[in-house]
Amino acid sequence: MTEPDSAAAAALDAGDEAGDERRDFLLIATSVIGATGTALALWPFIDTMNPSADVLALASTEIDLLPIEEGQSITIVWRGKPVFVRRRTAAEIEEARATSLDALPDPETDEARAEKPEWLILVGICTHLGCIPLGQKSGDPRGEFGGWFCPCHGSHYDTSGRIRKGPAPENLARPPYAFLDETTLKIG
Amino acid sequence: MSQPTWKNPIVAWIDYRLPIFTFTHHELVDYPTPRNLNYWWNFGSLAGVVLVIMIVTGIYLAMHYTPHTDYAFASVERIMRDVNYGWLIRYLHMNGGSIFFAVVYIHLLRGLYYGSYKAPREILWIIGVLIIFCMMATSFMGYVLPWGQMSFWAATVITNLFSAVPLVGEEIVNWLWGGFSVANPTLNRFYALHFLLPFVIFALVFLHLWALHVHKSNNPLGVEMSGDADSIPFHPYYTIKDTFGLGVLLVVYFGFTFFAPNVLGEPDNYIEANPLVTPSHIVPEWYLTPFYAVLRAITFDIWFIPAKLIGVVAMFASIGVLFFLPWLDTSPVRSATFRPVYKQFFWLFVIDCVVLWYVGANPPEGWFIPLGQFATAYYFFFLVILIPLIGFFERPRAVPDSIASAVTAGADPHREQS
């Protein structure tokens, strides 16, 4: 190997560096575009697993409240989930309203949970891991607080569907609903 | 190691182009294996055989099964009653899942006892933990397919675990379901993934074996093989030993299949799924109950973190912590044979796992709750605190210089010290 003369070597280095920069730029730009494109191409595959249009279309359910007696509960299906409709007795309403907010893990007043005090409308799914609490039928255990009791992991709900004891973190959820007239309820 | 020469011209022709015969000869015939492996070393190859049985029976079941909520339950009953030998193939597949987990759990505990996860076998171990994760996902999704009550409610409870994720929990669960509850889209995707995942496991097993064959098997003494006196060729010594073990395993496996095919299952799963009625007592299959016990052990919030999220994290961590085991263990000695303190806590850990298994199979009431909490505490205490500490404070017994010197009496000066 012969030593190249220093000026020529410097020129060569400079040229190389310029070339390197161009190549680096092209490499990085190409990689970024390629990676972005690949990431974007993943989206259809992720989104295809989300609820489809026909599933989303099953949005609302209407029910007739007339046959439900005081103290009686019915379960209806909305979006594949059970919805509890309970016509509460005066004693149950009183009990729910008398409870101090300090006694609640997820504090919420009964007034905020029932638009009409007589009608309590809840998604009948335990907020722990999705089991269906017992308490809809007359012979069911209703837990220590007279509402519902989840047999899976032992959560107790009160007469306002609020969590009182057990592993569930939140009160039973309220579905969106509206009273179309005195005796017709629309859920969803 | 001898380079085989192939006399058959067709074999030689193929081998020159694709050295599959030389490869097989190296890895399954000549392959040097420690001379002192005991029967606990059978369980790796047994797991491989069970995986193959599961894939074969699964493909035949797939030929008769219908993944639709309206037909799934009936199609499984049709397999049981009308399809020729359908009952046999389904019972083999159903009980094969239990056998697979039993074998793999023993395989895992063997690795834990003899320190098989230590350098240079960390990646081998990590791939093994990945295989267990995949097996759990596969078995869970497979359990949903018959669309019985336990299928449906297991799917509901387990997918709801993801609702514990802060902020986007509900979106994730709806994404997993493809709807607002476990329904037909869920069953369809579980079927697709239940078909796919065993092949992912198969690929991971290949990597597991590749990593194994780089540094070869650990052994009951936990010292590396050094020299010819320490090793014997895999064939015929371990092919025959593994085959004998397989015979014993098949007796047990077929014993369940033919004489008690439903003893490990839940009767509720022969009731068709009903989204409006939760069975009074939901339990996972026996091989998942220890993790279910960990999930339910957390009944209290810590600061602002809700109990539900902590429970879910603890459940995943109970397997996930095993990834870090090679770095948690500070002891230079592999085998518990030479670790008097570790050995005792190891057996306590085994008992602890049995307690978790028992608690997880029972309803969360009365003394099962504190027992489950105590057992969960020891589970993590052993893996995260005790294992690093014992490594520092324990004085191991003298380890032999080599596998051979351990059995050549008098030749090893270290032997009398212990």
Image: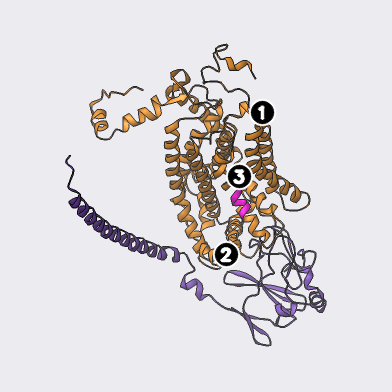
Chain colours: A purple, B orange
Q: Is B315 a magenta residue?
A: yes
Q: Which residue is mark 2?
A: B169
Q: Earlier in the sequence, mark 3 or mark 2?
A: 2
Q: Do discs 3 and 2 belong to a common subunit?
A: yes
Q: Are marks 2 and 1 in contact (CB under 8 Å)?
A: no
In the rendered image, which quarter is residue A45 located in? Answer: bottom left
Question: Dot 2 falls on which chain?
Answer: B
Measured as percent of width and height from the top left, residue B26 is found at 36, 28
Q: Which residues are magenta?
A: B313-317
Q: Amino acid at mark 2?
A: Gly
* Secondary structure found at label 1: helix
Q: Do discs 2 and 1 belong to a common subunit?
A: yes
Question: Dot 1 falls on which chain?
Answer: B
Q: Amino acid at mark 1?
A: Pro
The C terminus of chain B appears in which quarter of the rendering? top right
Marks 3/2: CA distance?
27 Å
Q: Is A14 a magenta residue?
A: no
Q: Residues within 10 Å of mark 2 (few under 14, many from 20)?
A: some
Q: Which dot marks residue B287?
A: 3
Closest to the observer, B225 or A19: A19
Measured as percent of width and height from the top left, residue B97 is found at 54, 43
Measured as percent of width and height from the top left, residue A144 is found at 80, 64
In the rendered picture of this protein, how many numbered marks are placed on residues?
Answer: 3
Q: Are marks 3 and 2 in contact (CB under 8 Å)?
A: no
Measured as percent of width and height from the top left, residue B24 is found at 36, 30
Closest to the observer, B75 or B183: B183
Q: Which residue is mark 1?
A: B340
Q: Amino acid at mark 3?
A: Tyr
Residue lying furthest front: A6
Marks 3/1: CA distance?
30 Å
